[in-house]
Amino acid sequence: MKLEQKDLASMLETGIVAARLAGQRAMEEISYVKASVKKSGELVTQADGRCQQIIVDRIKENYPDHGFIGEEGDDGEIFKQPPRGGEPFWWAIDPIDGTNNFAHQMPLFTVSVGALYEGEPIVGVIFEPATDSMFTAVKGGEAQLNGRRISAGDEEINEFASVGLDSHFGSDGRAPRWISEIVERTRFRNLGTTALQIAYVARGSLVATIVCTPKLWDIAAGAVIVESAGAIISDWQGEKIFPIELENYEGGIFQTIVTNKKVHSQIVELLKS
C-alpha cells in the first residue's frame, strides 16, 4: 500500500483529537489520583487505563481494523491488539507518559500517540496538557508545535546547552560513568517524561536526550517528530531502531538517544567510552 500525504494527514488529525481528549481527562483527574504498583515495579494510576481507552476508542471510530499496542494492559501486562485487516498499521500509545509525576500531582506529563506502518513510525503526536502544547509530525512532513514549524537546530554541547537524562538507568539501578561527564559539561535536565524530552530535542530546547529503559510507546511518536525536525534517533551504538517487528514485540526496552545532528557522534562516543 502506498501511503499518500492525505492519508497521513487524516491519521494525524485522528491522533491529535485522541491525545487532546485523553489529556483533558487526565487533567480532570490529577487532583484525585489513586496510584498502585504494577508487576513491573512501575506506578500506575486509575487515569492511565481510562485515558488509554479514550484514545483507542477515538482511533477505532476512524480505523477499526488497525492494531494497538500500549502500556496499560490487564494484570500489569502490555496492551496489544493486532490489526484485523490486511495492512500492518499499529498505533503505539502511552496515555500518561510521566506517571510518577502525575501520581504525585505534578502536571508535568504527556500523552504520546504514534502510528506505525510495516514497523516504521509514520505519525507522531505528543501532547502536554498543562501547557496545551501539541507536537506533531507525519513521515515526510515538517515537525510542528501548535501548528508552527520547529527545528532541532545545531547547538553544540557546552556549559549552557541542556541534555535530557533518564531517572533510572537499568536493572541494577547504578548510574553509569558517562552521567558524570554530562552533569559536569551541560545544564542537564530530567523532566520525568521521555516523550517530552524527545519533543524538546525536536524544538531545539535540548541538544540531546539519553534514555536508558524506554519502550516502544515512549519513543514511537517522538521518532517521527524528531526526524521531521532534522534530528536523529538511534540506539546507543548509533544504529537505527526501526523498523520493529510489532507482531513479536512484548514490551522490550530500546536504549535510545535523540540528538541534533551536530552532537550525535559525540553522544555515541561518550556512551561507548
Image (cartoon, helix red, strand yellow):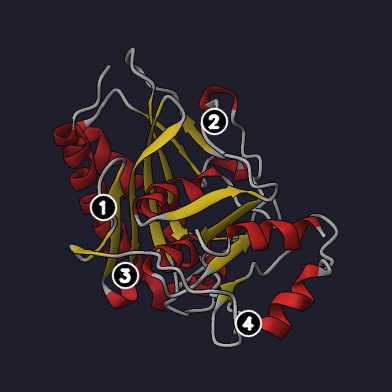
Q: Which residue is mark 3?
A: 129
Q: Are marks 3 and 2 in contact (CB under 8 Å)?
A: no
Q: Which mark is residue 244?
A: 2
| Label 4 Cα neighbours within 10 Å, binned few <14 / some 14-19 / many ≥20 | some
From mark 2 to mark 4, how far is it between C-alphas? 33 Å
Q: Position of residue 140 (x, y in %)?
A: 28, 41
Residue drawn at point x = 53 percent, y = 23 percent: 247
From mark 3 to mark 2, how far is it between C-alphas? 29 Å
Which one is earlier in the sequence, the residue at label 2 or at label 4?
A: 4
From mark 1 to mark 2, how far is it between C-alphas? 23 Å
| Label 1 Cα neighbours within 10 Å, binned few <14 / some 14-19 / many ≥20 | some
Residue drawn at point x = 54 percent, y = 57 percent: 258
Q: Position of residue 164 (x, y in %)?
A: 58, 71
Mark toward the viewer: 2 or 4:
4
Q: Which residue is mark 1?
A: 142
From mark 3 to mark 1, how far is it between C-alphas? 22 Å
Which one is earlier in the sequence, the residue at label 1 or at label 2?
A: 1
Q: Which mark is residue 186?
A: 4
Q: Is residue 257 above or below residue 67?
A: below
> In which quadrant is the N terminus drawn?
top left
Which one is earlier in the sequence, the residue at label 3 or at label 1?
A: 3
User: In the rendered view, does 174 fall on the left or right side of 255?
Assistant: right
| Element carrying mark 1 | loop
